[in-house]
Amino acid sequence: MTLMRAQERPGVVTFVGIVLYISAAISAVSAIVVFIDRNDAVYQATTGRTSTELILTAIVEGIIAILLVFVASGVLTGMRGARLLVALVYGIRMVVAAYWMLSYQGGGFGDGGILTIGIGIFVLWALYGHAESARYFAGRMAKP
């Protein structure tokens, strides 16, 4: 009787999963901070947004945080289609960050947007441009 050894997850995939969890935590904190400060006149003046717009911003950040937790779990467990989900979710995350970076001229959205886009480029490269990732997910897709 031979035991089949489970395919080991490459370090780069583990690192991407951790980065996604950290991004989710940052998005959750951002959602909470924006929600708490939504009625602060200085914050509204800095961002150039109304309380209602800031509530919508907090909701979007919260949804993104939940999606990032889901895709991070999928990446770390080798879920089929996880790379595609990461590309979709982080692609949306980068578009939202770019929009907020360009439309909110204050409140940390500029620096956060640049950081988010940089992390997104790294995550996409690590999952699609790294040979170990490609082998790992190809092996996961071949399983019944």
Image (tube, grey):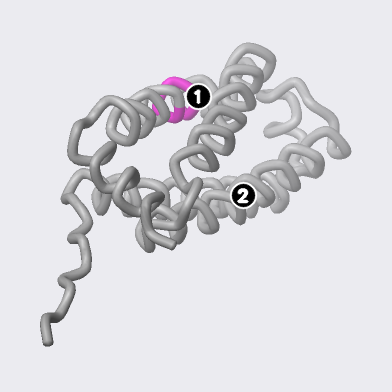
Quadrant hosting residue 53: top right
Q: Which residue is mark 2?
A: 33
Using the image as rendered, state which of residue 83 and residue 117 is in the foreground.
83
Using the image as rendered, state which of residue 126 and residue 26 is in the foreground.
126
Crowd tier of the residue under label 2, counting other residues whose Cα lies within 10 Å: few below 14, some 14–19, many 20 or above? few
Query: Magenta stretch?
Result: 112-116
| Residue 64 vertical position relative to residue 131 in the rendered view, above or below | below
- Percent position (x, y) of residue 1? 12, 87
Residue at figure coordinates x 71%, y 45% from the top left? 58
Q: Earlier in the sequence, mark 2 or mark 1?
A: 2
The residue type indicated by label 2 comes to Val
Q: Which mark is residue 74?
A: none
Using the image as rendered, state which of residue 98 and residue 81 is in the foreground.
81
| Residue 1 vertical position relative to residue 34 in the rendered view, above or below | below
- Percent position (x, y) of residue 8? 18, 60
- Percent position (x, y) of residue 85? 54, 42
In the rendered image, the residue lying farthest to the top is 102
Front position among marks 2 and 1: 1
Q: Secondary structure at mark 1?
A: helix
Residue at figure coordinates x 80%, y 43% from the top left? 55
Residue at figure coordinates x 61%, y 56% from the top left? 66
The residue type indicated by label 1 comes to Gly
Q: Main secondary structure of the magenta part?
A: helix
Q: Which residue is mark 1?
A: 113
Task: Tell me the quadrant of the picture where the C terminus can be found.
Answer: bottom left
In the rendered image, the residue lying farthest to the left is 2
Q: Secondary structure at mark 2?
A: helix
- Percent position (x, y) of residue 54? 77, 37
In the rendered image, the residue lying farthest to the bottom is 1
